[in-house]
Image (cartoon, coloured by chain):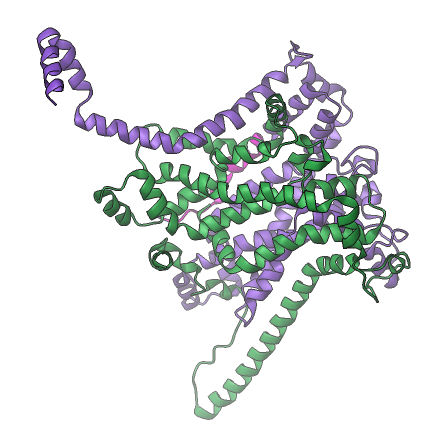
Amino acid sequence: MKARKEADEAVILTDVPARRRENKFFTPRRRRMLTGWLTGVLFALPVILGVLIFTYYPAIQAFVSSFTKDGEFAGIYHYETIFVYDPDTWPVFGNTLLYALVSVPFSLVLGYFLALAANFKVKGIALYRILFYLPVVIPGVASGLLFAHMMASLNSNGVFNMILHSMGLGELPFFEEASTSMLSLLFMSVWTTGGSMIIWLSAFKNIPSTLYEAAKLDGANAWDCLVHITIPMSTPLIFYNLVTGVIGALQCTTPLVIVGDRFGTAGGGAGNAIYFISVKILNEFGYTFYEYASALAIVLFAVVGIFTLILFKTSKWVFYGEEK
Amino acid sequence: MKNTYLTENTAPTENSVLTESAAPAEHAVPTENAAPGGHAALSNERNRSARRQQLTVRIFQYILLTVLAVFLCLPFLFMVFQSVMPEPQFQAGQILPTSFTGLGYVKLFSEHNYLTYFLNTLVIVGFNVIAMPLASSFCAYSFARLKWRGKELVFACVLSTLMIPGVVTQIPLFLMFSSWGWTNTPWPLTIPTLFGGGAINIFLFRQFMRGIPMELEEAAKIDGANAFRRWFSITLPLCVPILLFVAVGAFGSSWGDYFQPMFYFTDPKKFTLAYTVYKIVVLDGVKVNSVAMAAGVFMSVLPALVFFLLQRKLIDGIMVGAVKG
């Protein structure tokens, strides 16, 4: 303590303005604020570093390399290739958009009906909910393998076809032909509607029952309640599900697991009918066209961004409650 | 046990709706069984018909539920049956087996080194299951509870990473990790988890923590607990539902991930289960049906088991996440 005091005095004696400045800067309040700031940053540091190292840096790198060819700047060379020369581009983007636009609303609506059933007030409903949700927890690679097997042709003992055949309905080509591939993929997604069922169930539970009581007093029937209370009150969740669903669907790689490389292009399916952007990027990368794959990835990023923007811009229908 | 007490009573109060109370949506289902009073005899008559109607509705509900459950679970039951079906029966086009064999499973382990893949997977999954909830709750604590300048901006930057498709960063990441000599090691699939555990998880944790009353923490602060202690001893025990939810999510995503190992593993000794299933069954095409199906079953048993054991808390957790999301 004594030494400190002496030092302080020495400072006073020699350089008064400097000390005052220092004092002004490190008032106890400021010091506390600084510690508080440091604590806050320290807690957030892992994610700050993580985001910089594992997301922003690679993303920027992908962006930069999409403008280079063999390590040299090449301008929009790859983008020109994508939009002008690559015959895969339009089918691939078309397939992906079609899949996103159909599968997301489809699974939302289907999930809604499933949730209505899962919301019955009967004994043992918890067990039914487990059973409805079970297909969602099965890993994609296992269910892909299973459905590819079940949707095989009659000759390969595909079960769906065996059932259809025994009912005298002939045979469906499923993934064997281009015309039915996309529909088969949608058909497969029926089994994972349990995922959006959960979203709906939680929406149901979060709606104050007073709303329904009031509506009932006013003579509303079940349909009125559904249209004027349940759906408007769950719009934030629908919106959340819509955004995450569309982003997920645009990056879908499921065909990789289902059709493998049986049809020439890995994950392309018969006639490349279910060839998606992410799978195409992966294939290009596999052929060591790293920079071209990066350019494709950037285009995919732009597509995702545009869709998210459209969804947010048209989100007036989302009802966030009175208080916000 | 004090913790569970706290969880039940003080954790997000606004979420008590989750505890199977008033379920408004039953209005959405037509149930007209209200029998307003009248004359005694009449009401008796009405009661009886109302009860009968109710019974019919019940039966109808059960039939519908059962049909849906059977429809949704049948493919997976079928997978189990096919995995124990002897090959000649499959060749003959039988749908259900008439006798059983465990040959598919035996072959899986004897011909395909499954034990190694299983252990490799367990290491990665085990690491992520523990690291992901801890890392994301740690960072979320900063965004939910600590006050510091620039917090909102940083949080926005973190959330904005959700917009970037994984495939955009996948290739540069692969090049980066391989330049670090991380190929054929579990590091690319584990170490990044330590850095925040995923933006969406941080978001979920932050939302959940905001629902926890501040009083407890303020009391601890007055008692001299530093931020680390307040996070670890006060907040974390109150976050059990969301911790569990994130942990199971981590389990599911690393257990079923065949996409990333595709980049990083070239040495068959390092393969994970999901990648093996993709590689040997989908790409190389296992000839024997029961082996392929056994691989599928083996992949699915553990997730199904985890889900069965934790389903009640998990569905609540999913709901918490979903509601807040």
Which chain is the one coloured purple?
A: A
Query: In this rendering, is residue B66 above or below B293?
Result: below
Name the residue located 91 percent from the left edge and 59 percent from the top edge: B92
Q: Is residue B201 left or right of residue B213?
A: right
Counting from the top left corner in percent of width and height, residue B147 is at 30, 34
Looking at the image, which residue sits at the far front? A2
Counting from the top left corner in percent of width and height, residue B193 is at 52, 36
Counting from the top left corner in percent of width and height, residue A312 is at 50, 36
Which quadrant holds the N terminus of chain A? top left
Which chain is the one coloured green?
A: B
Name the residue located 59 percent from the left edge and 42 percent from the top edge: B123
Name the residue located 60 percent from the left edge and 78 percent from the top edge: B56
Counting from the top left corner in percent of width and height, residue A71 is at 66, 11
Q: Which residues are magenta?
A: A305-322
Q: Is residue B235 magenta?
A: no
Do we see residue A164 in this rendering? yes
Between A305 and B253, the one nearer to me in the picture: B253
Between B79 and B53, the one nearer to me in the picture: B79
Which quadrant holds the C terminus of chain A? top left
Between A2 and A103, the one nearer to me in the picture: A2
